[in-house]
Image: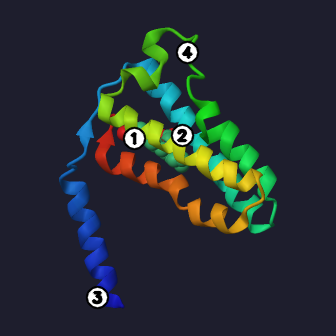
Amino acid sequence: MKALFAILALASTMAMAEDARQLAVLPVPAQEVLRQDMRDNLVALNEILSLMATGKLKEAGEVAESKLGQSAMGKHRSKPFEARPGPNMPPAMHSIGMDGHRAASEFAAAAQAGDRDKALALLPNLTAACVACHFSYRIR
Ligand code: HEC
């Protein structure tokens, strides 16, 4: 166990020493909007997990669709271009984000339909895009 921790600590130090993630250069206003969105994402995720844990599937589905799903796409459309994170991202990064919205909507549909088994099976997909993007891209 101790050895495992040592290896993990070493691995994370190495990961920090050479950050292999691609730098996405976003205009400063878009960076600020993105980081605010991200904090909201985390709150939404926490809300969804809490609702699932207490059997409130319909509510979990509603939060997932409105905050993370395809309904949450394009919400910065009316902002100046430099304040819109999505269209300022490299296309591959943007498409990870859109995959995440799609996955959240798929989960939301199952949860709103009250299909507990399917919703649970799709639940890990909610964080898959977060992980994929965070491991591949940084903005500073
Ligand atoms: C398309 C890429 C992408 C996706 C998808 C994504 N993130 Fe992020 N996230 C980022 C980037 C880029 C940053 C900023 C990293 C930096 O500061 O360099 C970030 C930062 C964050 C932060 C820190 C915010 C702050 O105040 O600095 C949180 C929390 C976060 N993300 C949560 C999430 C969660 C939860 C999800 C999934 C529901 C998610 N993110 C999905 C790209 C993404």
Counting residues from the N terminus, which is met first, the one under dot 3 or under dot 2? 3
Q: Residue at x 60, y 48 (%)?
A: 106
SS state under label 3: helix
Which residue type does callout 3 highlight? Answer: Ala
Which residue type does callout 2 highlight? Answer: His
Mark identifier at residue 101: 2
Cα separation between marks 3 and 4: 50 Å
Q: Is residue 52 left or right of residue 78?
A: right
Mark identifier at residue 77: 4
Q: Determine which residue is flagged by label 3.
A: 3
Q: Is residue 81 left or right of residue 102?
A: left
Q: Nearer the viewer, mark 4 or mark 2?
A: 2
Marks 3 and 2 in Cβ contact (< 8 Å): no
When the figure is inspected, residue 56 is found, relative to residue 69, above or below; the finding is below
Q: Residue at x 29, y 65 (%)?
A: 12
Cα separation between marks 4 and 2: 16 Å
